[in-house]
Amino acid sequence: MYWLQDLLTNPNSIAHIVALYAFVIAAGVLLGKIKIFGISLGVTFVLFVGIVAGHFGFTGNPAILSFIQDFGLILFVFCIGLQVGPSFFSSFKKGGVTMNLLAGGVVLLNIAVAVALYYILQGRVEIPMLVGILCGAVTNTPGLGAANEALQQLHYSGPEIAMGYACAYPLGVIGIILSMILIRYFCRVDLQKETEQIQHEEEANPHLKPFFLSLRVQNEALNGKTILQVQNFLARDFVCTRILQDGHIYAPNSKTVLHLDDKMFIACAEDDAEAITAFIGPRYEMDWNTANTKDVPVVSRRILVTRPKINGKTLGSLHFSSMYGVNVTRVNRSGMDLFASRQLRLQVGDRVMMVGPQDCIERAANLLGNELKRLDHPNIVTIFVGIFFGILFGSLPIAFPGIPTPVKLGLAGGPLIVSILIGRFGHKVKLVTYTTMSANLMLREIGMVLFLASVGIKAGENFVQMVIGGDGLLYVGMGFLITLIPLLVIGIIGRLYYKVNYFTLIGLIAGSTTDPPALAYANQVSSTDAPAVGYSTVYPLTMFLRILTAQLLILLMFN
């Protein structure tokens, strides 16, 4: 039985460490699925299983544990950056500015409450532990990793700040959901009216999404003009996918000449439909799918963009109409239909809707790739090139006045910023950033559980003693106040002053704490997708701020 004893107890054995991680992660993920009053802790339960394992003496070589912890953190934050990168900058447009300001207010108030408690308690809680409590209170694991990284730069040798994180996390999840319920009652929210408001706004606020209409050409000024000339006259983008002339239907191109009484089937942005109708002629009811065609059948197909060389090219630069004889009506990206304007840049993974003769569509499909197998292979080069430059960027010392030690973004901040930039601008340097949602989620979850298991195992030795004989209950109470007070203040301001719809507001609250269980609760309450929209609007900036401020708090306040 010596082999079994060595497997279970030898901290320098690779087999022991792998088995330990496998057990902690598997048990943590399974236990995390258990719901209490409809709330589960998810993969964060891996941290608590790791603490239990560490408490009973199951540990490993500290150098190996630290390596796995840091590598898991890098993988986690890099995949987050790739996911949020495409929407990071666009989230600041129009209504997103107000929502991001409110989310930024939550972040700042969280810090203000934490610092106020630190001074009220007259230094009873050290700054590193305070930051751990803060990260647990707002359920932000990357922030904990960033704080750990900053402490390593300062050669900190005190207690593991994961203890504070673990104490504050459970009530942090509950506090976020409780704040949503309290805001509903404080502000006397009528859920039915909120739903009707969302539906009314969707009807009254057309977005840049495809809109289809059939028109009869009755403007005499257009007689004898080409479709390209009409587009230039209008100064609005539209695509004519089919035209009926002399009793025949075919797919036109930009050089097709229009005549009075021609019938056109047009795709355009919804908010341009009225102007296009007024300029060309009245709407005309017609079933284009059953009508006769001139030479060959006009068909429509979705073509998948899989060729890396197409990544980042505009639709206008590919000349589908003039060179291939097909028209592009819309592009589906990540489940959302976008109007195919000439300025729209294609990305690997887009699904392009084409209309035209079958053989012409086949030629255009060869240009775009349309090979599903290509997307089954992840772009490993992009991931590790990004990680390499992220570590370089995170290692750059940045000097600030009044801070004795130069600030470094570290293993969390550097890869996060680089991955956001790659996710948004990678096509400009020929980097294909496409990964399927399942692949991104898999890499992200592996990174997270490796990080949480490492932190839990390292913190487990002294955790029970700290909770029972130390300040564990104090940490719990501090964390609950750090969670609840800012969310109530900002939530009421957002509701009463900015008039944010309640469903959007609770999505914003979940996003400002980067908390998936809270988003799940918000989705249960709402019959619309408004919570998901609010969550995704503020999530990128909030995640960035959580990671950055956790490091800055350590570097600015810890002596």
Image (tube, helix red, strand yellow):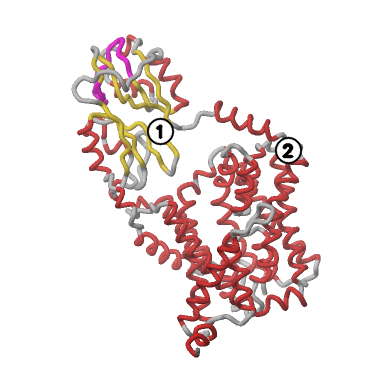
How far across and how far down the image is residue 291, in percent? 29, 18
Q: Which residues are magenta?
A: 250-264
Depth check, front residue: 412 or 168: 168
Magenta stretch: includes residue 477:
no
Q: Residue at x 55, y 46 (%)?
A: 536
Around disc 1, counting alpha carbons within 10 Å, would you say few (fewer than 14), some (14 to 19), or many (20 or more)?
many
On residue 496, which mark appears?
A: 2
Check disc 1 and report its element: helix, strand or loop.
strand
Q: Which residue is mark 1?
A: 339
Residue at 21% x, 38% y: name it: 363
Q: Which residue is painted at 44% across and 41% down in the image?
A: 335
Q: Main secondary structure of the magenta part?
A: loop
Quarter of the rendering containing residue 161: bottom right
The picture places residue 527, in percent across and down from the top left corner, at 60, 37
Q: Establish if 350 lies above or below 165.
A: above
Q: Amino acid at mark 1?
A: Phe
* Residue 353 spot, x, y in % from top left: 34, 35
> CA gap, disc 2 to disc 1?
35 Å
Say left or right for 293 vs 448. Answer: left
Image position of 338 with respect to 409: above or below: above
Pick the quarter of the image with the C terminus: bottom right
